[in-house]
Image: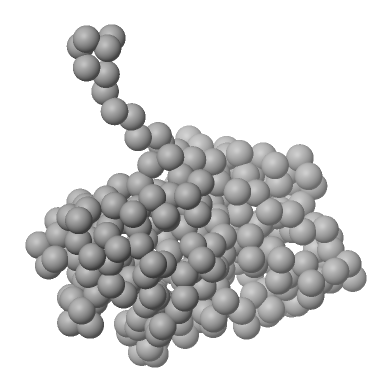
Amino acid sequence: MTTLLQIVKRLQELAPREMTIQGLDSRVEIGPQTETDQTNTTVNRILIATYPSARVVTKASQDKANLLVTYRPLFPFVVDRLSGLDLVRVRLLSKNYISTYVIGTGWLCARDGLNDALVDALGLERISDFTADSDYGQLAAVGRIVKPPGVKNHSGFVNYIASKLNLSTVMFCGNLDDEVGDVLVSAGYHIDMPDILNGRRQDIKTLVTGELTPELRLFAHEEGINTLELGAFVTEDPGMKRLRDSISLEFSELKIDYIAANPLALGLKPYKDEMA
């Protein structure tokens, strides 16, 4: 018999809280909050996903999962009332006695976590960690600095990245003819202005990440850094799949599933009038 507390403790070891950045701590978001209650809660089936979307919550309930583990939380910020889709998801989880656990940005920075899984999926070779201060005053590896894959310019690099992850669209900002040097890879949406400045000081001229705000994209461009944005959830999925594989080995008595995020958008080039 496996308890919720046993799983929570193991997830906390895999994603150390002291590596948390941007306030995205690991926590039980819905479900028993005390160790006593977690000890008394049995888990038989786990579903792992990047984000607790309506599709993911529905699958968890249909599969009769006891625990849903995600990277992104249901509620990034404190809310005082529930409505709309949030209310529907919480009701569905509560009705089916499904606890939810957010693994947080400790998993982004951890060894063999989100960043390393993305680097491996891209077939790139790590050189060093790219660090920043965590919320707990520790140095956290918010990204990995990697060697370029042998292509000479960013046009070839974009094609290389797209082929590795089977992407139809990559958002690129910069000069496609620039030579590719050392590359900063950071999964998710966590790169901020200090990271851009830090990267520039380390002579990083290429950034691969999930998403940037328009302001950061412009700032990186002005600092001479070429950016490749692969899209929401795309860069996080390899790390969550790796988490499923790791947990499955350690809790072999449990049924542990993983569901990938669906692509949210497709880049389209408008037809010219004569092609309509």
Q: Is residue 239 left or right of residue 93?
A: left
Q: Nearer the viewer, residue 150 or 190?
A: 150
Quarter of the image with the N terminus is bottom right
Q: Nearer the viewer, residue 79 or 157?
A: 157
Q: How many marks?
A: 0
Q: Is residue 239 left or right of residue 143?
A: right
In this view, 188 is above or below 38? above
In this view, 253 is above or below 145? above
Residue with the most extreme bottom position? 138
Q: Residue at x 75, y 77 (%)?
A: 6
Q: Position of residue 95 (x, y in %)?
A: 71, 44
User: What colour scheme was applied to this rendering of the protein?
Assistant: one colour
Q: Residue at x 18, y 82 (%)?
A: 201
In this view, 161 is above or below 61? below
Question: Which image quarter: residue 142?
Answer: bottom left
In this view, 71 is above or below 172? below
Q: Position of residue 248 (x, y in %)?
A: 77, 67
Can residue 225 be spotted in the picture?
yes
Q: Position of residue 121 (x, y in %)?
A: 54, 62
Question: Which image quarter: residue 206?
Answer: bottom left
Can residue 75 be spotted in the picture?
no
Question: Which image quarter: residue 144?
Answer: bottom left
Q: Is residue 58 left or right of residue 23?
A: right
Q: Residue at x 41, y 60 (%)?
A: 188
Quarter of the image with the C terminus is top left
Q: Residue at x 35, y 62 (%)?
A: 151
Q: Position of residue 268 (x, y in %)?
A: 33, 29
